[in-house]
Image: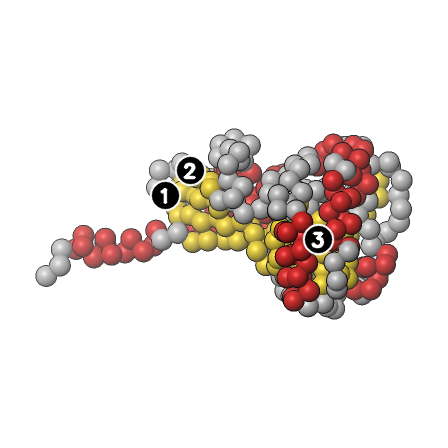
Amino acid sequence: MPHPEADSASVVTVADPITEIAYAKVNLALHVRRRRDDGFHELESLFVFAEDGDRLSGFATDDGMIALSVDGPFGAGLGNGAGNLVSEAAIKLQAFLGERRGAKLHLFKSLPVASGIGGGSADAAAALRLLVRLWDASVDQIVLERLALELGSDVPACLRSVTQRVTGRGEGLEACAIEGLSERPMLLVNPGVAVPTGPVFAVWDRKDRGALVAERFDELVEMGRNDLENPAIALAPVISDVLARLRSQAGVRLARMSGSGATCFALFDDAAQRDAATTNIRAAHPDWWTMATRIKG
Ligand code: C5P
């Protein structure tokens, strides 16, 4: 007859790691309306998410400690202690819940750091989602979004990781559907320069160029803008080379910078055109980072 402990050993499967994907965030349009008294800016933005991103996996532990290991193409140089938004998110949620358990987490970092596609924000949001599952916590979505906002302006939107209009500093979230976005082929290109968000906003010329009004894809293309494009180009001129290179590819419907840069995106009607553009850009600029993906539905 098997020893009772042999049975409990087979129950170790409860500690099998579970995974959340930290989907890359892309601002299809980002209108900056005004600078607020608290130093943040009022935005109107259309957020979409790529189908790919970083991967955060982990399991709950009994020791109360938050342990994080990091690897992947952009793992080096990203600390795993204070300052890493995954650790910050975990500690914040643990304190809020009064949770006595800890977690052992592993981040596989595929997205470039400080690159305008969420990176740290998506990782922080993935950490919140993962830990709610690992600790089987019941947290109101509104409360979770408030914790998320304390971690960064883009973290609440990244929690949902769906196509949405985002207003305010990043706390006004409204899921929306624009025909032709879901599953649309997308290419992301980053020229390898890290652009910190704060300094880009600081260079913005404080001119309000108007609201974001885009109900349809053609309106998004014609009337949407990224008001941080010129400020970011002033700090990292290579961004204009990325945009020119993307816009010269066959089949590009829209090419723009995401967030505060330096990553730019191009949208295509079909995947073959996206793949051809990816091949061209990799050949011309082997040092640039590229990701051929689709808009998450
Ligand atoms: O909130 P987050 O940590 O991502 O913001 C980084 C910096 O970007 C802020 O300190 C601020 O300078 C700038 N920012 C802003 N307005 C926003 C979001 C960010 O000015 N809506």
Colour approach in the figure:
secondary structure
Query: Residue flagged by tag 3: what amino acid is it?
Result: Phe
Residue at left 24%, top 56%?
10
* Horizontal and vertical percent position of residue 63: 35, 38
Q: Does residue 75 lie above or below 215 as drawn?
A: above
Q: Secondary structure at mark 1?
A: strand
Q: What residue would you read off at disc 3?
A: 265
- Front in this rendered view, residue 281 or 185: 281
The residue closer to the viewer here, 176 or 114, is: 114
> Does 187 appear above or below 257?
below
Q: Which residue is mark 2?
A: 67
Which image quadrant is residue 294 in? bottom right
Are discs 1 and 2 less than 8 Å apart at CB? Answer: yes
Indicate the amino acid at tag 2.
Answer: Ala
Q: Crowding at label 2, few (<14), some or many (≥20) Cα neighbours within 10 Å? A: some
Q: Residue at x 86, y 56 (%)?
A: 223
Q: Which mark is residue 41?
A: none
Question: Residue tagged by mark 1?
Answer: 61
